[in-house]
Image (spheres, rainbow, N blue to C red):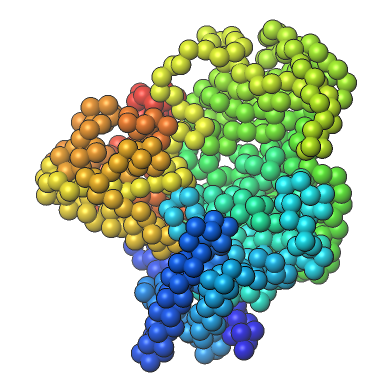
Amino acid sequence: MLRVLVVGLCLFVCQLHADGPSDNVPDNVRSIPPKGSDIPADVQRELRAGLTELQAAIAQAEKAIAGKTRLLELLPDVLIYEKAVRWALDYNEMYLDEKSKRNDADVAKVLLKKGMERAKELAEGEPSWITAKGLVVRGYRSKIDGSVQPYGLVIPDNYDFKDTDVLNSRNKHRLDVWWHGRYENNLELSFIAERQRNRGEFSQAGVITVHPFGRFSNANKFAGEVDTFEVLYHVMKNYRIDDDRIVARGFSMGGAACWQYAVHYPMFFCAAAPGAGFAETKEFLGNFQNEKVKPEWWEKKLWRMYDATEYAGNLFNIPTIAYSGENDKQKQAADIMTKYATAAGVEFPHIIGKGAGHNYTLDAKKEINAWIDNQVQVPRNRNPNQIRFTTYTLKYNALNWVKILGLEKHWERAHIEAIDSGGTFTFNTSGITKFRMGNRRWPQPHELNKVIIDGQEMPELKAAFIHAGDSGQPAGFGRVLETYRKVEGQWVAGKMADVGLAKTPGLQGPIDDAFMDSFLMVSPTGKPMNEKLGTWVEAEMKHATTQWRRQFRGDAPIKKDSEITDADIANYNLILWGDAKSNAVLAKIAAKLPLMNTFGDTTIPAMIYPNPLNPKKYVVLNSGFTYREYDYLNNARQVSKLPDYAVIDVTTPPNSRFPGKIVRAGFFDELWKLQANDGKD
């Protein structure tokens, strides 16, 4: 029965990923996800009763396993079923379609049954799914907002659960990460059901395949980007994964995700195989949407976060094979990546499915699989003699044994090439003010090593002998960390005095960056400066929390300003709503924040800045994630829409693109200071 239901579900879902020129009208946007179908009252009552029963079983299980850490860690594996059904009912996110035979109500009944089975097994201390083979759905609790998020696995038949040493076992498995395509109504309910019946586009013997949910349909950006790493952490904690043989794969929206992960994190994967999708914003929207894109100047700069074309040279560090259907408009993605990669001196194969549209051909699948199988015969090289890395932000700053720690100017090109020629390290840089060289190992002793940076000879590095360890790493000479900083045009080795506030990895902005780590929204309890600002703040905070749930599938954590503790300040990026009169936390730090003079009768700032109470975390003023309803209609639009700060005129009503009229916007400099012309030049 489940197979019939979900086959119909998949047919319906696959029809609802359409976007195109009709979605180019900001004043007339569709709801994403769409409004659900009318579910008969008796069916809703039946599902509510089943949900109540499951919630009681979960409560009983929690009581039974209290104090048992390993079993408590498995609770998300049960909670994902409760959440899937509860949210579908509470937020009208169930879909019925006679033509495709989709019936989410029937799927919900199946998921309630599965949730009950797991709750019972957990209460008894015998969770069978943790040693199941084949199709397995798991869940984890996200550090970002505390929500439970699902993901799917395909566990091969030859996986030996008797070997429980996930860290040191010599019997580890290759892992393929598969990012899914765009489905506007493929929410938790249908995702879990699909992952319980469908092995996916690629499923190979002996290979574990993981299917991240990605927090819905955001092309694995922002919190969706973090989702993959939280999933991988959870998988590698519970299964024997060979972390030198992790393959990045995806198609359509998932192909776009694959390009992004390959260029941002080339050291993490041993190979990448993107199919279709998009690789940047402007050209894709013009080609696919026939959209005449007219960005603000700061939006163009912010494209450089997710435009994979700008990072195409980083494919030098990761074997990559692309696929496109011959007649697919999304062939544009691989074509433009080929253009930019070639300009950077990098080549990769591009397989064309003859006569194909937006799909793989059988011959292409065989060819791609054979290519990947060949690549994984040689494990990922953790210790390459040559690396090249380009970035525009300290968000993406590390590759193997080099970590970039400072830029001349964010959102302008920064590049480093490092070569270890056996006793001599040569670095060529541009746009970089600080970097760190990590540990190196050599089979031959090079006790003294020359270092040359941009033609400047540095003090020699002395290596220490490292004995072979349990990790299997061979003995050899290695080097502990060394940091280099550019001072008045010259490179200097070693630590230097702290310069105070500075943009550093994980503390570099823009506003959206605060929502890629643990955050807490702080609501005001005092009287606002004026009624206009108060009304705007109330509406925008509601919009931010509602859209977080709809687009990133979690409940935004909220506390009143009067309830914030020292632990909250230590552990969270604080999202402060209101002004210095209405929000007590903002009042404490207002004197140490810039742009406080932009609070006015009709203007209010949205901003990200290091928290004066804890400079290792952010404060954000008056903003959620910054792309809005118009951008939900195409994943290539889902990029940051506001920079480090913006001043908003609240007399202009919010719309599908902005929270009001943006009268000023810009980027702080590398020391978190205001720039001339707001950083436009």
Instruction: Write the residue at 51% across / 84% down.
Output: 109
* Residue 556: x %, y % from top left: 37, 55
**Whether residue 358 is visible:** no
Query: On the picture, is 505 further left or further right than 158?
Result: left
Instruction: Write the residue at 53% across / 37% down.
Output: 395
> How many numbered callouts?
0
Query: On the picture, is 627 further left or further right than 361?
Result: left
Instruction: Write the residue at 72% across / 71% down.
Output: 134
**Whether residue 493 is visible:** yes
Q: Which part of the image, by quadrant, shows the N terminus?
A: bottom right
Q: Quadrant of residue 150?
A: bottom right
Query: On the picture, is 402 further left or further right than 552?
Result: right
Instruction: Write the residue at 53% across / 58% down.
Output: 68
Pick out the residue farthest to the bottom.
42
* Residue 550: x %, y % from top left: 41, 63
Q: Which part of the image, by quadrant, shows the C terminus?
A: top left
Q: Quadrant of residue 274?
A: bottom right
Query: On the picture, is 606 further left or further right than 119?
Result: left
Frontmost residue, 125 versus 670 = 125
Residue 82, placed above or below residue 364: below
Residue 676, placed above or below residue 339: above
Residue 591, placed above or below residue 129: above
